[in-house]
Amino acid sequence: GGEKRKKKPLGLAVAARATAILRSLYVDAEPHQFMARVKHVRIWEKVPEAAQAGALSSRLTTKVDISWDQFNPLKAFIARHIGRYFKMDAAAYGENRLVLELLRTLHALLKLGFYFSSELAPLLPTLLGLLDGRDDTVGPQDKGSSGKRYRRKVTIHVDTVAIMDCKLEVCRILQLLCDVRLDLRLSRLLALYHDEFAAGLWEPSGEQPHEQPRDSLGGTRGKLQAIGATMRALVVRDDDGAGSGYARLEEGEGGRSSLAERTMAVIGAQDAARSREAAFKKLFELLGFGATEMLVGVLMDLTFYEHPQLVSAALGLLVRQFEQRQKLLSTTLHSQLLVKPLMVSTYSTFDELLRRLSQLASRRKLYDDELFETACLLGKLVAHCSEESNSDGAELRSAGGFSRTRTARSRAGTTRTASSRTDHTEGKYLILIGKGYTAVGSDAVRIELADHRPPRPGERLQLEKEMYSVKTVSPPTDGVVEVALDRPLKVVGALAPELQIGGSGEVWVMLLCQSAGYNLDMQVLLRTMGAHEAVLQLLRLPVSSAPLPSELRTRAVLRAVYRTIKALVTGFPQMQSDLVPAIPRMVEHVEKDLVAYDVTPTGCVTAILRDNRAACARVPFSAIHKFVQLAAKKQAPRFLRFLGEICRPAGVAIKRNCQLVAQALGSKEEALLLFNSTEGMEERAALIAARDLETNPRGKLAYHIEAVGLLGTLVTGINNPNIEQMVRETLPMDDVVANLLLPDLPTPLVVSYLRLLDEAYLVTAKPLVNDLATRDFMELLSALQARIAAFVSRIEAADDLDALALDADSEEAAAEAEETDLLLGHVFPLLTHFFAPPRDAMEDSDEAETQGVGGLSASVLLLLAGYEDGRDEPFLAVFRALGETTASFRALECAAVLSDPVPVVDCLRALASGAFATLGDADLGTASSQGGGLSTIGVTVTLTADKKEAHPQAELPRFAAVFETAVAAGSEFNALVRIFSDGLDAAHEHELQQQRRGKKACDLPPAAQYARSLLDQLLAAAAAPAHPVDRGLTVASLKVLVRLLDIGRVGSSANEGFVDADHNKVNDADEALLRRRQKQLTEQGAARVALMMGACADDEYCRLGLQLGIELLRGGNSLVQQEMYHVLKAGDARAFDGSGSSWMPAVKARLRRGIKEIDERKMYLALQAERRAMLPELTAGLTAAAALAVTNDVEAPFQTQAFVAEALEMLSLLCEGHNVQMQDYLRDPREGQDSAVEAVDLVIEVHDLLVQLEPSLDESNVEQAILCIDCLTEFVQGNTSLGNMASLIESKASDAMERLVCRQRFEGVPADAVSRLRTSVSTWFLAMLEGEGTVAEERFLRTLDLERLSAVAATAYMAGSTAPSAAAGDADDDAESRERAMAAGYSLSTLIKHLHDYEEHAAFVPRAGSHGGSVVTSRSLGAFDAEGDAVTAAAKRAMAGAIGRCEIVGASGKLERVYFRVPEFCNSLTRESKDELLWNVDRETPGRQIQELFARSQDLEFEMRHQHSLSRLPFWSIVTDNRSVFDFLVLRLAFIQNAIILIRFSLDPQHATPADAAGADESDAVERALSEFDLAGPGLNATDGEAAHPPSPLAAYLVIVAVTLFAAVAPVLLAWRDTSRSPRDKARVTASAAAVAAVIGGAGNYLVEHWEWFSELYAWA
């Protein structure tokens, strides 16, 4: 028995090893491939088939011949064996190892797609049982509850690590299973959509993609609701195609049917909606993990193991479990549905290409055949993106259904851009067509074609980096052709050993192809399929700095990679954004000689950055300096093109980049090749004569053209005198004009010089038109006139446009195109700017925007700037506008500048008349669209679209919106948060129980440690960068922590608690819970996590870290403030992502980034608005997916990378509550000592941000300005050290604040935001005045214009005191806005009063140099109340009376004044209450006075609030204003009332007392006497069963008197008391009152005369 026990583990160990070998040899081997991934591209016709199959979509679409049943016995064995181990024992070493290997084999089989969903469902209980370790044991003596299983222990007897590895593998299997089920669920969901779409339930909404609104906040639900804004609840179609159900009810089409039919239609629609919701929810039963509570318990138990990878995997699986619905929704929205046969076939081709490319890219190193195959695959991808012909020679058209292909357009819109004239790579690319065999010095090549057509004579080939032309080609034989080149093979640089002198060998043959542009449909499809991910992996191929013969093929593959990247990103903004993180890797290749004829790493980086302002703005100065050095060293045009692109992306300048480039060029003058000297001009002339620009596109002449163009780019669209002066010193005007006068200059060089002349000397901050009045410049104008005249003569010489039609590929067509663009794009704008008046004169002219004095109106300039070609902008409209404005030339008096302007005028007149003569009668629709140059003038190409059909891609967002609503996708995350919140509550309850028992908190329940496990995982990952946590898990963990603290935001109507940073009230109960959560998480390390995340360079980590810090500090939690202070001071806040920064330098960098984003945001919004207007043109001819991609890019909001709002809010909360320690630390982290801590002054950084925001304030950044001011207020409020005040008092802060508060016009800023801005500014001023110092008062009295501040305060007060708007729905918002306006007025008045009192009581002595040359004195301050009109003066007096002041003498004996706004209800205290308080308070000692005042304060406040609430009633206002009159009336009414009571009740026997019994006889006598006169009240003697007597006539008389008193007498008294009434009005009121009294008297008399009739009527009633 002992021998068997010894052999059993050995046998199991062998079995485990055999399993591993079997997996490596047969399972995880070719041709098997990775299948367990979600496919976002689906073939529409095969969607139902994929849903029914229950297999992975990758498995259904693959073309690889795989036997899917070959591992069925292995799968059955795995299921049987691992099913035995629901409970694992660490002592069973052999069994655990075998289970581990079987689990790894199961993982491989699942990854490779060998499981159907029906086979996975039975495995789930087994896997979950293995994952549950709560019953595991460590040896036979362990009962499983000791906690030993959590610890790592490896001995000869037990091995807990093996069990942990098994559970880790199960987690990985379940993670992979989540991807599998996501793919299967997506198939079923799309199948539901397919059925409904086929049934006609998803009719087109009638909106094009570009018309759909977008949610600026970027929320998924908001976007879906915006996309489906016009969607009906449900659309049901009848057989005749008419709408029914809800559609008929909404459209009013149900009148033709009976009510019963319409009702049944509605019921049917509701049943359909319910069945759809049931089908949606049933999706999540597929491969579900069972009860959520059980799974949560299992996974959270795993977080206690001493195995970091297992803990991370368990938490990651927990997050995946609670984001199933959101993941499915997101995947659905990003799915692409293919309908057209061309797109379907292309997808099949791409799928096979990318499958093989991914396999090759995943390898560490590629060898000969693999390198060649990789290059071929990359070439095919480039060919498909480039709109080239396919292998059959047929034109490859876009799948959009239009008559011509559509390419991706630039985001620059109609902005005049600086496109390069020397980039020979535009529209050209090389593809590998086969292997050639030749020898050095031979012109014959034998080519073995690789799935490509043979080259044709005249085409160009590249062999070993040299270009050759094909002379002859032999007919292909078995894929082999013989090609004769135009010259012998020559190799420059590294040479392969087989090609040495005298030898022959293999070369790769590349064919040069040309394309009009890249196909956006193909780019979108490849992005959806993830092609860029596989391509980027190939950038890891190792190469040395200098070319080696052994790595020539590897270098060729890398050049093919860059070629593919260029094809993927050109004109496709979304792909550009995806590849921006890969730029650093590409920059590493810049100096590794990877230059090809058609592509370079620098050119590829330029293509990624093109029109991407956000990425260009983040280019560091080190990169700019490096490229300038490379330009000076190699003098390659591509480096200057890169610099030009980052200076003006999308045609709009980035000032910061222009300054940096100019600075770098100034320090490296050799980077500018200008040929200014005599020898240089001779050299340039020789290069021009040798046609160097065509023969050597990367030569000196091309570099010279790019250098001149770069100088022009630096001064284009930027008002920077320093850069303009640098350019003028580099290229003086005389040199520019002299170069333009030279004959035979290449047109690109002429364009560069003209642009530099225009931008550096004409369109400048200070125009230099007078300096241009030289003989050389006049000669230049004459030369330009001659050039225009020649252009006009060619138009006039042509009978029609057909005569001008040229071959688009001919040199003549290219020359005509260059000439056309030169005149229209550069000469005419230059003439316009030259003849235009000075800029200051244009600013004073009302017609400056509508009519250009230079002969071109603003509309003409706009048309010229937006010129692309004749198909996009008909030149007939341009010429017509030119003709209309030609007369302006004649009106010019420019003899001092141009002695004879007639030639130019005649030239333009001839141009206009020639245009009308030749183009006016032309047939604009018949000319060829392929002609170049003049043939494009006036030609418009009509895009004839196919008949529009409903496409499922267009309606997919609407379907996704319905799905999101039905399954409540957002509720999943709340359930995940609830798990951790319940754990925190459990910890609190446990602590309370321990306190009640008098014990220390120990042995927390497992649930109480969930949040600690989450934080420990993040802290451990920060301490061990070698074992990073999954990014998705990190992001989810941070979101959970933020949501745990999202407590008590109940709106602004609550009356208790505190107000958070979002101006939301938090009641007391929620405040207590929030404080408890903040304390718990802080003790567990959340404060440190927040600071570490906030220090990250990663944008998402930083944003979430700042949000977590805000939530921890919300309400000014002093405990969190102290913890963060200690963490910062100890230097424990290093970045989580390993970037090396700490929190304060990171926040500094974010704030400085915010300064750069001020202009970027404005430019971005302007460009987006421009592109939004062009959306119909941009999306015409594209597939639904491509059009949606363009629309999403156009509607995308500005993506900030500064997070200014979050950073400022966190800084404010750190200092809230007068935290002096933190206030000083944020200004000086060294605390006045010499230390290694980086000196970061965040106070000045916030100040600098505000100073930059102030001149650019608009609706896009006003909230940032308010946050800046509030943050500065927190920095100085209560700062007893006065360090921050001293730092700000000498800065530009007060000047910027004054300009902000006194500004009259705010561009697009709501009035409510203006009020909050002014309130914040005044609060900052008052905070600066706190304390015992007088520096701030002295400074403000000398610099502030208090008169303007007083006027602004009055204006704000009047805006707040105006009547509310009539709209009932806006009553609350209007009241809040008016209150904020009034608060702004009171705050400013408080500031003025404070300065007034200081100047009056502190003997303020003015000094020279004060603001405005004078000092505001006490006399002028006191006179402010009387200034302005009556309304303004009244407003100032009202505010002055509502500002209180409290004088306090501190321990130092100094008097300090505290100013405050007296609440409005305090004015409601009655005079009686004031007198009562005055005479009843004991005033013997000050202490008793204050004591009794506070004792009575609560009652007084209640009375004032009650009186204030009554004062809002209109009638009560009348009563209080005429109190004496109503006192008189009330007194008279009291007499009448008492008389009635006496008469009514004095004779009633039941009210008589026993003492009156003796006089009963007398009472009876009186009653009888009264009854004779009928004066007794009703029912005095009546019993319960008797009828009551009617009232007596005396009571009627008394009522009539009372009515007369109020209806007639009261109005007369009120009228005579009103001093504003005229005597005539008072007489009219008196007469009216007399008439009313007469009427009342007459009515009373009639009543008394007919009293008997009235009595009978009363008795009957």
Image (cartoon, rainbow, N blue to C red):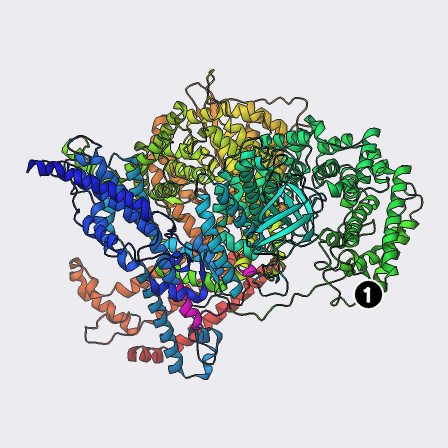
Q: Amino acid at mark 1?
A: Gly
Q: Determine whether, in the image, residue 1574 is placed left or right of residue 547.
A: left
When the figure is inspected, residue 375 is found, relative to residue 155, above or below; the finding is below
Residue at the extreme left of the image, as rendered: 1
Under tag 1, what secondary structure?
loop
Task: Look at the image and tell me whether residue 490 can be seen.
Answer: yes
The location of residue 987, given as percent across then percent down, is 23, 38
Q: Is residue 1531 magenta?
A: no
When the figure is inspected, residue 1177 is found, relative to residue 585, above or below; the finding is below
For the residue carrying disc 1, how many other residues have a C-alpha within 10 Å: few (<14), some (14-19), or many (20+)? some
Quarter of the image for residue 1127 reads top left
Quarter of the image for residue 1631 reads bottom right
Of residues 1131 and 110, the one nearer the viewer is 110
Task: Look at the image and tell me whether residue 1389 can be seen.
Answer: no
The location of residue 443, given as percent across then percent down, is 68, 44
Of residues 1062 and 588, the one nearer the viewer is 588
Of residues 891 and 1334, the one nearer the viewer is 891
The location of residue 1610, given as percent across then percent down, is 48, 59
Q: Quadrant of the C terminus?
A: bottom left
Of residues 122 and 1059, the one nearer the viewer is 122
Q: Quadrant of the N terminus?
A: top left
Q: Residue at x 49, y 60 (%)?
A: 227
Q: Determine whether, in the image, residue 1323 is placed left or right of residue 1024.
A: right
What residue would you read off at disc 1?
920
Q: Residue at x 51, y 48 (%)?
A: 1378
The location of residue 1179, given as percent across then percent down, is 59, 59
Q: Which residues are drawn in magenta?
A: 190-213
